[in-house]
Amino acid sequence: FESPSLTGYRDMCIHFRLDTKNGFHHICEVQVHHKEMIELDKEIGSHEFYEFFRSYFAGATGTLKEHLDDLQLISEGRFVDDSFLVNLLANCRDVDRLERLGKLFAKQLCEYDNAIQVYQRMAQLESSRLGSKHPMMAGIYSTIADVLQQKGSMNEALVMYEESIQLFANSIGVTHPAIAAMYNNCAGVLEQVDRYDEALEMYEKASTIFKQQLGENHPSLARILHNMAGILTDQCKYDAAVDLLKTSLNIKLEAYGETHESVANSYDGIGYTLVHQDKLEEAMENYEKALEICQRTVGPAHSFVATVTHNKGELLHLQGKLDEALDAFDMALQIKKKNYGEENSAVANTYESKASTLVDNNRHDDAMDLCNRALSIKKNTVGENHSSLASIYMTLGSILFSQGKFEGAMNMQRKAFRIVQKVMGNEHSSIIGIYSNISMILIEQENLELAMSRAQQGLALATKLNGGDNTTTALARSHVGDVQRLQGKPEQAMAAYEEAMRIDKRVFGDDHILVATGYRKIANALVDQGDTQRAIETFNRSLHWYETRSGEYAYSHVDTLYDIGRLHAHLKKFDQAMEYFQLALDICVEAECEDHYIAGRIYCSIGWTQKNQATSLDKSMGSYRKAEDIFKATVGDDHIAVGIVYNGIGEVLTLQGQLDEAKDYLIMARGIYEGQFGEDSFRIAELNYSLGMVRQKEGNFGEALKLLTKADR
C-alpha cells in the first residue's frame, strides 16, 4: 500500500505482463478497492467522476497543486467569479490547462458559457501558434460546436460544425474518417432542429467514408447506421429502421462483445422502434437488456441510463402501468438534472412525458405545471417552432379538454398541427393524434360534420403509415365510431369499436384501459340500438376493470358510471340512475376533482333526473345551481355547459309556475347557444320547445305553436 498522494487516494495496485503465443504482450493493471467504494459507485456512479478526474489530474505531481487551486476557485460558491475568468482568459497561455478547464465546465459543471469562453481562448492561442487553417483548429471548432449543442444553441453549433468540416476538408481531404465523424455530429444537430432530409444526407456521406476507409464492420459505421435508423423511425419507416439497427448491433457485438455501452444503445434503439410496431413485450426486453449493460458499464448515474429509463417509462405508460411509469420518469429526471441542470431540452422531454402520465392519473394541475415548465425550457433551448413543442401543445390540449375548456384545447391542437406540418409535413405520425384530438373537441362543440372529416383524415393517415392492424390505427378508427354513433349510425359505430377492440386485445391483452374504454363505447352503441340488456352487461365489464384499480384513470371510471346512470335515467329507473351518479361523485371526491368540469356534468344530469321525478324540483334546482357554480368557475359564463344548465333551470322554473323567471333563463341559454352554434342546431330546437311550453302555460297558444313547430322542423 502506497502512502496517500496529494490527491488523497490510497490504493493497492499491481501491474503484470501477459505474454501471448504470437509474441505480443500486454501490460495489465489490477486495482484493489474497499467494498464500500464499490457500493458507493453503484449508488451515485462515482466511477464516472473518477474517470474524468483521473485524466484531469494527469501529469507531473508538481502540476497537481495548480489543478486543485483551479477546482477550489470554482467550487467556492459553486461558480466562477468574473475576476477569475477574466484573469484566466487574459493571461493564461497554457493550452493544456485551458482544455482541462473547458472539459470541467462542459462535462461536469454544465457551465456551457464558461466552457465556450475557455475554448475560444484556446482557439485564439492555437491559431496564433499554428495558423488559422491548421487541422488542429478544426478539432477545437468541433469541440466548441459540441458544447453549443449541449447548451441547446443548435444554429450556432451548426455554423461551428460546418466551419470545422471545411477546415478538415481543405487540409486532410474529404475522405478522411475525421470528416465522417464531423458529418455524424453535424447530422445529429440537423436532426434536433428537424432538418431530417439534410441529416440523412450527412449520415449517408459519413457512411460512405467509413465503408471506404474502415470497412463494412467498423464500430464507427455502426454508430452511423444507428443514427440513420432514428430518423427512419421518426418517419414511420419501422421495418427499414429495425434492419439498420440490427446490422449496427451485429457490428458492435463483433467489435465489443455483449457488455458494452454502445451495444446497450442499440438495444435501446431497437426497443424504441418495436414500441411503434406494437411489439411491446419484445421492446421491454430490449430496454431491460440496455439497462442491465449500462448498470455494469457506465453506472446508474450516467445520462444514457436516464435516456433508457425515460423510454421505459413511456412504454409502461402505454401498457397502463401508471405508477411504474411515474417512478421511471422521476428516476430519469433525477439523473438528467444532475448531469445537465434544469434548463435542458432532455429534461423538458421527461417533464412532458410525466405530465402526459399524470393526466391519466387524474393529476391535471400537476400535469399543467410540468407542461408549462417543459414549454418554457424548450422555447429557451430549441426555439418556438421545434417539433418537440408539438407534443407539449398536444398534452396541454388534452388537459384543457378534460377541464371542458374546448376553445383553449382547440388552440393548443392547432399550434401542434402548425408546427408538425411546417417541420415534418402533412403525413407525419404526430398528425394522426392531432386529428383525433380535434375530432373529440368538435364533438363536444357539436360540429359533427367537421368532426367526422377530421376523424376520417386521422384514420386514413394512420392506415397509410401503420397499416390497418395497428393500435394507432385502432384508436383512430374508434374516434370515427364516436362520430358515427352521434350521427345516428350505431351499426357502423359498433363495427368500428369491435375492430379497434380486436387489435387492442391482441397487443395489450384484456387487462388494459383501451379495452375497458372499448367496452364502454360498445355499450353506448348497444343503447342506441335499443339493446339495453346487452348494454348493461357490457357496461359492467368496463366497470369491473376500473373497480380493480386504486384510483387510476378516475375520469374514465367516472365516465362509465355517468353513462350507466344516464341509461337508467332515460329508462325512467330514476333511483338506480341516482345511485350511479352518486358513485361517480364519490370517485370525484376521492380523486380531488369534485369541483372540476366533470363533476359539473354529473350534477347537471342529477338535476335532469330529479326534474323528471317531478317530486324533487327543489332538489333539481339545487343540483343545477351546483353545476352552474362549477361551470362558471372552470369554463366561464358563455360556455355551452352553462347554456345547458340555464335550459334546465328554465324548465324547472316552468314546472314550478315561475314563468317570467323561466323565460329569462331560457333566453340566456339561447344567447349562449346562438353564439356557439348559430340558429340552426338541435340545442336551439330544444330551447324553442321549452319556450313553447312556457308560452302555452301563459295561454299564448299562437306563439307556443310557432315555437313548437319551429323546434319540430
Image (tube, grey):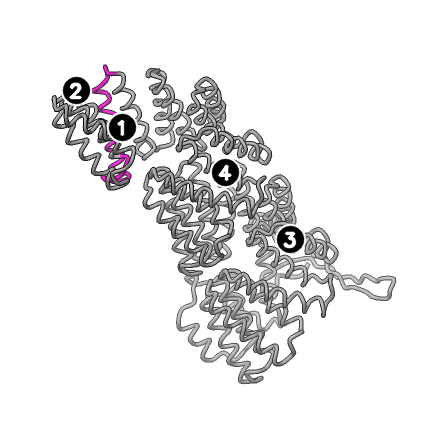
Between circles 4 and 3, the one closer to the viewer is 4
Q: At numbered mark 2, what does the secondary structure look like: helix, strand or loop?
A: loop
The residue under label 1 is 712
Between circles 2 and 1, the one closer to the viewer is 1
The residue under label 4 is 477
Q: At numbered mark 4, what does the secondary structure look like: helix, strand or loop?
A: helix
261 sits left or right of 479 in the view: right
Q: Earlier in the sequence, mark 2 or mark 1?
A: 2
The residue segment tinted magenta is 614-641
Predominant secondary structure, magenta span:
helix
Q: Earlier in the sequence, mark 2 or mark 3?
A: 3
On the rendered image, what quadrant is the C terminus found in? Answer: top left
Magenta stretch: includes residue 634:
yes
What crowding class fits label 4: few (fewer than 14 Cα within 10 Å), some (14-19), or many (20 or more)?
Answer: many
Q: CA distance from mark 2 to mark 3?
A: 70 Å
Q: At numbered mark 3, what does the secondary structure look like: helix, strand or loop?
A: helix
Q: Earlier in the sequence, mark 1 or mark 4?
A: 4
Asked if disc 4 and disc 3 are in contact, CB closer than 8 Å, the reply is no
Asked if disc 1 and disc 3 are in contact, CB closer than 8 Å, the reply is no
**Amino acid found under the numbered disc labelled 3:** Ala
Eyeballing the image, is 208 above or below 584?
Answer: below
Task: Judge whether residue 70 can be spotted in this image.
Answer: yes
Compare residues 103 and 352 and report the one nearer the observer.
352
**Amino acid found under the numbered disc labelled 2:** Gln
Q: CA distance from mark 4 to mark 3?
A: 26 Å
Magenta stretch: includes residue 655:
no
Asked if disc 2 and disc 3 are in contact, CB closer than 8 Å, the reply is no
